[in-house]
Amino acid sequence: MHSKPPIPFDEQGLLAGGTTAKTPARAQALDPQALSRHRRRLSGAETSPWLHEEVARRMAERLSYIKLQPQQILQWSPFLGGGSAELAQAYPQAQQLLVESDPALLARSTALHKKPWWQAWKSGAAAKVLAPQDLAGQQVQLLWANMDLHSHAELPQILALWNASLAVDGFVMFSCLGPDSFVELRRIFATQGWGAAGPEWWDMHDIGDLLVQAGFGDPVMDQERIQLTWAEPQSLLKDLRALGGNIAPTRFAGCRGKTWHRELLQALESLRGADGRLKLSVEIVYGHAFKPPPKLRVSAETSVTLEQMRAMVRKTS
């Protein structure tokens, strides 16, 4: 596992040292139909994807650096993201709001967190499940979004919604896949001419710049690379399917047959390292930022009449 030191951004979107963060020139290219199809399939799983749960555990370790004790926590896409147990342990008294943007995931989370009538008298309120359009008026102290941001094509809109849902001095914590995820698999697909193996995910510098543009203060970005290993290619493909699927619009458009599947298994053998295990690397991007108080706008030029000036002089004399 390798990690890079955190990268702070200031209010002008400058990196440490005064260089300007690159402004993204494109949206993150995703296939919305493929994304919806994979989310619908994953909504039937028993638990969150295995990698998401591990990243949630790692992200929760960073909560110890935050002094604020939130009264309300908004979990963004909690069923796939995971982390509910870690948040409940860190903030046992906080009210939990769960937001699901996909209809299938919204229905699944609603069913999971619906409190039976015979338990209604017990202490502790059940988590409240919401759709994004129900967020109007919500002002939470912590917005938690684990392994979800890479599934949104337009980041400015989602970051603006996050900012609007936070109370002043509240903070957002999130994680997502970075552009170097599954680079080994990308090379295989490129060599074989099989189309894209996955989307071109956002770089952490781009995300940090967009946080500043969305109105967040003191954003800090960092990343780590996790190496995953398997004994057999069939196990590798099974675990990748449990994470979701290929939602790149430039992926191979046709149906794959048995011949291609056999060729894929053979190609995956090239991922074996010296220890005999297949290896894939995943880049995880982490970020957190606070919502600062609104700034007062000061005009570059102010007009004062002579009568107003005289009145101000009389008040101060």
Image: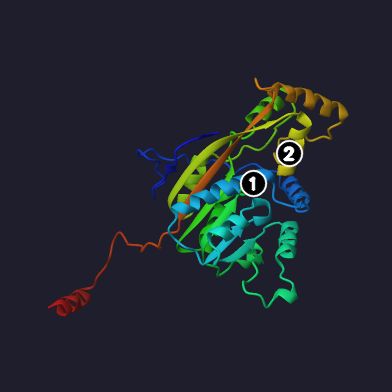
Q: Earlier along the polypeptide chain: callout 2 or callout 1? A: 1
Question: Under tag 1, what secondary structure?
Answer: helix
Say if residue 196 shows up in the picture: yes
Instruction: Please rate how many residues cluster around mark 2, counting C-alpha atoms within 10 Å: few if below 14, some from 14 to 19, many from 20.
Output: some
- Inter-mark Cα distance, 2 to 1: 12 Å
Question: Under tag 2, what secondary structure?
Answer: helix
Q: Is residue 60 left or right of residue 35?
A: left
Question: Where 124 falls versus 106 (above or below)?
Answer: below
Q: Residue at x 65, y 38 (%)?
A: 199
Question: Where 171 falls versus 228 (above or below)?
Answer: below
Residue nearest the observer in this picture, 147 or 115: 115
Query: Quadrant location of residue 16?
Result: top left
Q: Position of residue 224 (x, y in %)?
A: 53, 37
Three-letter amino acid code of the residue under disc 1: His
Q: Residue at x 63, y 72 (%)?
A: 125
Q: Which residue is mark 1?
A: 52
Q: Which residue is mark 2?
A: 239
* Quadrant housing the C terminus: bottom left
Residue nearest the observer in this picture, 85 or 225: 85
Question: Where 6 falls versus 85 (above or below)?
Answer: above
Q: Position of residue 302 (x, y in %)?
A: 28, 65
Q: Position of residue 252 (x, y in %)?
A: 76, 33
Q: Are marks 2 and 1 in contact (CB under 8 Å)?
A: no
Q: Residue at x 69, y 26 (%)?
A: 277
